[in-house]
Image (spheres, grey):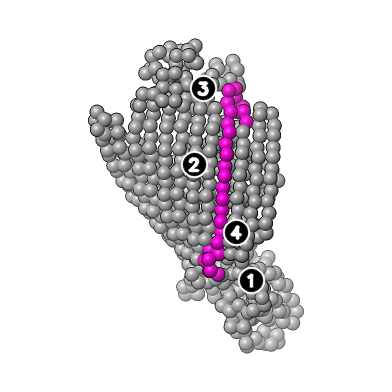
């Protein structure tokens, strides 16, 4: 687990204070004697072919010297730069549109000039702009300026720990509580900082920076969750930094990052088996050919649950294509198909039932069937060396049918409407069941812009974005006459919709090792519900709306690459469910 990975800081615009560094023009470097206690550093920046790259911003930060501000210098038409620095170890990093960041550590001593060459790779555009669009931390060097706690479970940790479910992976993160439900991690219950974990309703779940739940505004419940096999790393953000996401900003944000296509053709397969008829198979293959990278994966998992008369089978198929459109534009397209067929109950056991047989499951005919199809696209464009625009477009369709004889421990086995049932003795004969039948459709688009600029010699960064989002729920409940009914009396039939527009801005002011980040998010949501059974079948509709301001302020102090201290305050917001906000 990585709390804050060692990173290189993006340099502040301006010059270092006297006594630390004196920037000089590439063509007029003073002699070592004129510089006195400083050493001249000459450098060139080239691409892989050896051609010079002009206009590269080279950030230079002293290592092992807390409180020292970085210095920046730009390369000239010949790719050259020069600067005079105090003796010691300095870290150089580059930044320019269309190229990946290159870094180097340089030790300066004595009075002899030092020369360094840096090579920037244009193929790294995929990494640079995709990281910004899909990760909470953005580029690695921004982590130490983030106004909040960002914890990462990286790919190496996930691989070495051989986690069985997402629950096991999340338990390694500080402040997270995960409650198991069926043992397969199909519907994790996640709570952050003491919040109720049931159905993860107070947590914002993202995959590659895109909302993962099927109704984050109108019904933020987790009845679907991607398998841990397809996740490369996990980011958990707590604090005022989460107002850049939303809608939920109460507990925290969890972002699942998926793998990108390999540079060369590669594949792997894993087969596992165990007791209780367990089988897990996962395979992935990918390649990159010129400007196109492809990656696909398939997983099959099945097995009996920890309780009697429970069994789950699930299939997960994913595909990803990464296309470098131009040296400054990248397009990532994703698609996935998930299917679950489970013999699993909604209800737990009462104390007397658990004492008699802790693994029993009286509700042997309960069944859950769920499918999810999702697709998304991320377009990232480097507008200039100081601005990057990324746009996420997403859609998903989720359907679940859960036929069950009990929806809570007090309902044994059904409600008073099931008069033929009697009691538990008739559970498998005359008792009926309930079919909770749900259909969800979610669509959205979200452009985000990151701009670096300098005002009065002070480096500043601004993130801003807008989201348009719509979701629709078709909810039905049918009460069956027998334990194995798959149709019955229609007792609920309504449509619930949520249409949202959100915008945010976060502005970072960098003064030495201190970053001050004020921010504001605005959420406007319109809820509507139509009860098709009301008014003698003619139906009745209702609507409501809300607008919420979500301000935040954070301060971060990063004296070194391995240490960041921060403080922050922000408003927590979680939108109500449609049924809680609309009367009809």
Tell which circle, 3 or 4, labels the residue nearer the N-terminal end: 4
Q: Position of residue 195 (x, y in %)?
A: 49, 39
Secondary element type, mark 4: strand
The residue singled out by tag 1 in the image is: 120
Q: Are marks 4 and 2 in contact (CB under 8 Å)?
A: no
According to the image, label 2 marks what residue?
Answer: 372
SS at circle 3: loop
Reading the image, the residue beneath label 4 is: 293
The numbered mark, 3 or 2, whose residue comes first in the sequence reads 3
Residue at 53% x, 41% y: name it: 338
* Local secondary structure at mark 2: strand
Q: Who's the residue at 66% across and 29% down the image?
A: 277
Up the image or down, 114 lies above or below 208; here it is below
- What residue do we see at 36% from left, 45% from top? 498
User: Which of labels 1 and 4 is toward the front?
Assistant: 4
Whether the residues at callouts 1 and 4 have beta carbons within 8 Å, the answer is no
Among numbered discs 4 and 2, the one appearing first in the sequence: 4
User: How far is mark 1 from mark 2, CA to CA?
Assistant: 41 Å
**Mark 3 crowd level (few <14, some 14–19, many ≥20, 10 Å Cα):** many
Give the CA separation, mark 1 to mark 4. 20 Å
Label 4, residues with CA under 10 Å away: few <14, some 14-19, many ≥20: many
Q: Residues within 10 Å of mark 2 (few under 14, many from 20)?
A: many
Number of the front mark, 1 or 3:
3
Q: Are marks 3 and 2 in contact (CB under 8 Å)?
A: no
Residue at image location 58% in from the left, 28% down from the top? 311
Q: CA distance from mark 1 to mark 3?
A: 61 Å
* Res 365 label: 3
């Amino acid at each position: 687990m990585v709390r804050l990975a060692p990173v290189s800081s993006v340099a502040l615009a301006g010059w270092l204070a006297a006594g630390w560094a004196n920037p000089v023009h590439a063509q007029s470097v003073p002699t070592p004697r004129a510089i006195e206690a400083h050493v001249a550093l000459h450098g060139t920046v080239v691409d892989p072919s050896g051609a010079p790259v002009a206009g590269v911003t080279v950030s230079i930060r002293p290592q092992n010297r807390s409180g020292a501000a970085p210095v920046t210098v730009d390369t000239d038409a010949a790719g050259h730069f020069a600067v005079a620095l105090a003796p010691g170890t300095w870290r150089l990093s580059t930044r320019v549109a269309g190229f990946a960041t290159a870094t180097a550590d340089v030790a300066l001593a004595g009075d002899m000039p030092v020369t360094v060459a840096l090579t920037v790779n244009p193929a790294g555009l995929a990494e640079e702009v995709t990281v910004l669009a899909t990760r909470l931390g953005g580029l690695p060097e921004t982590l130490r300026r983030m106004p909040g706690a960002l914890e990462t479970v990286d790919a190496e940790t996930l691989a070495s720990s051989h986690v069985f479910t997402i629950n096991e992976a999340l338990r390694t993160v500080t402040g997270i509580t995960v409650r198991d439900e069926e043992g397969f991690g199909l519907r994790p219950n996640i709570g952050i900082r003491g919040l109720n974990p049931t159905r993860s309703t107070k947590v914002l779940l993202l995959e590659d920076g895109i909302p993962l739940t099927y109704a984050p505004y109108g019904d933020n419940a987790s009845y679907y969750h991607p398998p841990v096999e397809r996740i490369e790393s996990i980011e958990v953000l707590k604090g005022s930094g989460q107002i850049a996401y939303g809608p939920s900003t109460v507990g925290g944000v969890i972002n699942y990052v998926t793998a990108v296509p390999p540079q060369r053709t590669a594949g792997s397969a894993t087969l596992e088996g165990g007791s209780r008829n367990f089988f897990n198979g996962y395979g992935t293959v990918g390649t990159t050919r010129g400007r196109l990278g492809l990656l696909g994966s398939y997983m099959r998992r099945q097995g009996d649950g920890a309780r009697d008369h429970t069994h789950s089978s699930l299939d997960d198929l994913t595909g990803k294509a990464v296309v470098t459109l131009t040296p400054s534009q990248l397009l990532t397209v994703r698609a996935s198909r998930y299917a679950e067929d489970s013999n699993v109950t909604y209800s737990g056991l009462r104390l007397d039932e658990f004492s008699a047989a802790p693994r029993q499951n009286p509700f042997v005919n309960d069944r859950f069937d769920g499918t999810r199809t999702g697709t998304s696209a991320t377009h990232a464009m480097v507008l200039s060396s100081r601005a990057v625009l990324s746009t996420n477009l997403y859609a998903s369709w989720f359907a679940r049918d859960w036929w069950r004889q009990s929806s809570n421990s007090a309902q044994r086995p059904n409600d008073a409407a099931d008069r033929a049932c009697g009691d538990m003795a008739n559970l498998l004969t005359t008792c009926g069941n309930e079919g909770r039948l749900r259909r969800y459709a979610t669509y959205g688009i979200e452009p985000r812009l990151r701009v670096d600029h300098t005002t009065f010699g002070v480096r500043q960064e601004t993130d801003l974005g807008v989201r348009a989002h719509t979701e629709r729920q078709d909810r039905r409940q049918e009460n069956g006459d027998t334990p194995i009914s798959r149709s019955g009396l229609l007792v609920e039939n309504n449509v619930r919709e949520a249409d949202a527009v959100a915008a945010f801005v976060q502005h970072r002011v960098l003064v030495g090792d201190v970053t001050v980040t004020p921010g504001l998010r605005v959420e406007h949501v319109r809820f509507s519900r139509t009860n098709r059974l009301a008014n003698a079948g003619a139906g009745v509709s209702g609507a409501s709306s809300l607008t919420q301001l979500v301000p935040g302020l954070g301060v971060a102090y990063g004296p070194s690459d391995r240490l960041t201290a921060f403080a922050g305050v922000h408003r927590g917001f979680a939108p109500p469910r449609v049924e809680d906000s609309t009367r009809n």
